[in-house]
Amino acid sequence: QSVLSQPPSASGTPGQRVTISCSGSSSNIGSNSANWYQQLPGAAPKLLIYGNSQRPSGVRDRFSGSKSATSASLAITGLQPEDEADYYCAAWDDSRGGWVFGGGTKLTVL
Amino acid sequence: EVQVLESGGGLRQPGGSLRLSCEGFGFSFNSYAMSWVRQAPGKGLEWVSGISGNGDRTHYADSVKGRFTISRDKSKDKVYLQMNSLRGEDTAFYYCTRSPYTHAWYWFDHWGQGTLAIVSS
């Protein structure tokens, strides 16, 4: 059972907007930044959002992140077939002295 | 171009040992924290261990504390994960990751392709 809670699956049609939630606690998301990783099928994970809402160079502005209290969200607008992937949230946990991940959300583009 | 490259995966029996290596390219290796994140086949991501840029601080997940040791060799631009007392649940792809600063509590901005460790009799 993961420390951060994500829905196991999400779906949408091309062009739609999809959001993925990530729920944590005061020791992780509540006191540190939320970060998101995208893992395409058969590939290594890749940083998608850092510092709650920052995009690394090369990440399309269709991807955005937000944080409120002990929860974070990833939004994908203008959904495209190539967005079909697993998405993970992560945060440093002060109580554990290490990183915690969500269980991952499998995004299907219908 | 920043790259990290893992090596050392393989098959071991329960109770055995394995040492994973990770080499960094295209950046000043000793200025950045490095971590290991693993993924059991078909499962999610699990952080394993991290080390600061100068090697003075190490962090471990409870699931590996006392069995795994992370270290780095400044002269070789490498970080290692020594895995002892291996268990079946340690079977996973092990990814080497870089953080953008010297402390391990920053996000992972670069990932390697992973190396597979299998623990089975």
Image (spheres, coloured by chain):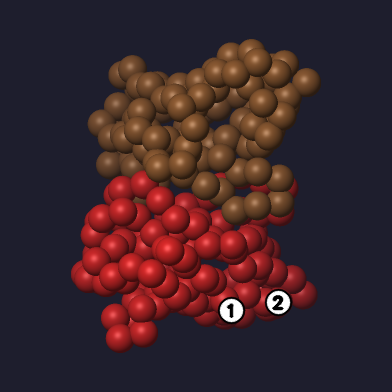
Image location of residue A101, percent across then percent down: 48, 40
Tell me, yes or no, if residue B83 can be seen here. Answer: no
At a point 26% along the width and 31% down the height, the residue shown is A31
Image location of residue B77, percent across then percent down: 36, 78
**Image height of B78 relative to B101, above or below:** below
In front of the other: A77 or B117: A77
**Image height of B47 relative to A51, above or below:** below
| Mark 1–mark 2 distance (CA, rounded to whole Å) | 10 Å
Amino acid type for the residue under numbered disc 2: Leu
Determine crowd level at label 1: few under 14, some 14-19, many 20+ residues with C-alpha closer than 10 A: some
Amino acid type for the residue under numbered disc 1: Gly
| Mark 1 secondary-structure assignment | loop
- From the image, state whether disc 1 or disc 2 is nearer to you: 1
At a point 70% along the width and 76% down the height, the residue shown is B11
**Which chain is displayed in red in the rendered image?**
B
Image location of residue B100, percent across then percent down: 31, 54
Side of B116 relative to A74 (left or right):
right
Mark 1 belongs to chain: B
Q: Which mark is residue B8?
A: 1
Figure quadrant of residue B72: bottom left
Chain A shade: brown
| Mark 2 secondary-structure assignment | strand
In front of the other: B101 or B87: B101
Tell me, yes or no, if residue A56 can be seen here. Answer: yes
At a point 32% along the width and 35% down the height, the residue shown is A51
**Image height of B118 relative to B101, above or below:** below
Q: Which mark is residue B11?
A: 2
